[in-house]
Image (cartoon, rainbow, N blue to C red):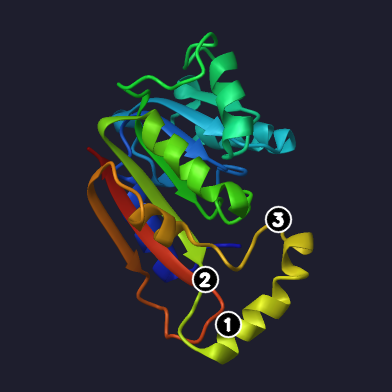
Amino acid sequence: MAANEVQVKHIGELLSGAHGKVLELGPGAGDQMFHYKAGQIEMLYAAEPNAFLHGKLCEAAEKYGLRSKMVTLEAGAQPGSLLPALKGAGLIPSTTSSLLDEGVFDTVVAVKSLCSAPQKQLAATVAVVQALLKPGGEFLFFEHVDNSTDAITISYAWLVDWIWPVFMGGCRLNGKLDKVVLGMGGWEERTITTVGDFKGHEVFRYIKGICRKA
């Protein structure tokens, strides 16, 4: 789903702050890559489960000055997919079952991707994201979550969600990323806001988040 003018502004503000060693979850074909500031990026690890999009990712990285800094990983965001890929890339030890206390990444990014991650594993996914961040590292996300403002919208979203994932790559309308992040400890700072073009009745409620690890 293409970002509208309002969303592009928010996504740009988030990704322009990405720095150091960066992990992006579900970058797709690299449609958001132009927001990165190449001079701030040490390495960009692009965890995209659809290997057919890796060629497009490399083209985007070349266009925006990140090709020499980008590594593609054939992996989703859920721990069972992401962690083996990180081990294969030598980013985390292959001989340990626990993650290092000092973390790996300065920034972890998710833009319109965690809605397609298995929602039953969302809490575990965010816990791994936090563990992968270095102390002071940031989790930057722009995602849509459920809208619980009125019964009619809730009922409509529930009905649509029976067929929506089939045609939209597993995307779910009942995302709870904001609730998961706010319900866990370990953050020094958490700022999660609903994007300003939300009027209260839409099925999609987009949020922007910046969470800094303690």
* Picture mark count: 3
Q: Quadrant of residue 157?
A: bottom right
Element type at mark 2: loop
How many angstroms separate mark 3 from mark 1 (CA)? Answer: 19 Å
Amino acid type at circle 1 is: Ile
Residue at image coords 53%, 55%? 112
Count neighbours of disc 2 (C-alpha within 10 A) and say few if under 14, some if 14 to 19, many if 20 or more.
many
Q: Circles 2 and 1: CB distance less than 8 Å?
A: yes
Q: Which residue is mark 3?
A: 170
Residue at image coords 37%, 70%? 195
Q: Position of residue 6 (x, y in %)?
A: 40, 70
Drawn side of residue 32 relative to residue 73, left or right: left
How many angstroms separate mark 2 from mark 3 (CA)? Answer: 15 Å
Q: Nearer the viewer, mark 3 or mark 1?
A: 1
Residue at image coords 30%, 40%? 138
Q: Which residue is mark 2?
A: 146
Element type at mark 1: helix
Q: Which residue is mark 1?
A: 154
On-image quarter of the C terminus? top left
Foreground residue among 21 and 63: 21
